[in-house]
Image: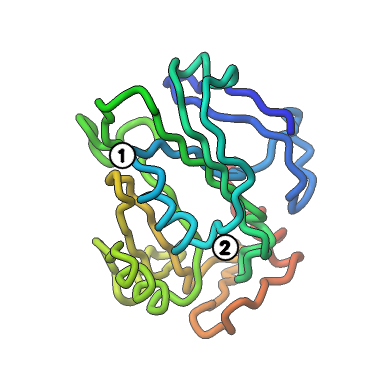
Amino acid sequence: SLSYFVEDPNGNPFQIVEGSGWFTATGHPSHCGGVAGSIIGVSSMEQSLKLYRDVLGYETVVYDVTGSFEDFSPLSQGTFRRVKLIHREARKGPFAKLLGPTSIELVQSMDRTDVRRIFENRFWGDWGFIHLCFDIQGMDELKARCEKAGFPFTVDSSDTFDMGEAGGRFSYIEDPDGAWIEFVETHKVPVIKKLGWYINLKNRPVGKFLPKWMLKAMAFNRVK
């Protein structure tokens, strides 16, 4: 599919890709939607696949190629191994229809050994990409699966973390290179704040979608 890279004003690269997983037409003149995936640098492809493929469920390899790539030339030079992963089965859960299908591309430099970790000389909250976040259901089951695979939770709010208008359970793990991955299990979320309309998701059946009209109603909460 068609794709190209751009940089934001702070020098952070973004890849614009052509996709078909749209929740609804935005009408925005850019013709852009939301986040469709992430490109993550790794030092060991095989170790990283144990997490992203085996634990997080991106089980299908779209391509596994090694070489020099023209689309990477504005970002970095050299030889890279690139593995793009997708999930064949549609994700389930309250917000799955809104978030849509996603992909993860793992990139390993075959020339360099001076790999920098994402937090080297940086603090959480600095400009740039800090961590990858997943909306999930079944935190206890996921915790057990991560621990069994060797990726234990480093942070776990354990119960509902109240943020006033919203609340949920939050946890973090680290990938083999120290990149943070956050899991969010939403328990309470505003549908239309001005009307005081909130929905409790804590006891909602696992895998059940929120109605499309309700997801669209949440657009009234956005800050303009």
Please name whichever residue, 175 or 206, is drawn nearer the observer in this view of the structure: 175
Local crowd size for mark 2, using a 10 Å CA cut-off: few (<14), some (14–19), many (≥20): few
| Residue nearest the viewer, comparing 133 with 24 | 133
Q: CA distance from mark 1 to mark 2?
A: 27 Å
Query: Residue 132 in the image: x percent, y percent?
Result: 43, 48
Please tell me whether residue 200 is drawn above or below residue 114 in the rendered image. Answer: below
Which label sits on residue 125?
A: 1
Image location (x, y in percent) of residue 41? 40, 36
Q: Residue at x 26, y 30 (%)?
A: 116
Identified at 38% across, 45% down, the residue is 131
Label annotation for residue 96: none
**Residue 2 position within the rendered picture, expressed as x and y whole percent measured from the top left:** 73, 29
Question: Who is closer to the viewer here, 69 or 20?
Answer: 69
Report the side of 185 relative to 180 (left or right).
Answer: right
Mark number, residue 193? 2
Vertically, is 66 above or below 167?
A: above
Q: For the image shown, how many numbered marks are present on the structure? A: 2
In the visual, does 31 lie left or right of 142? Answer: right
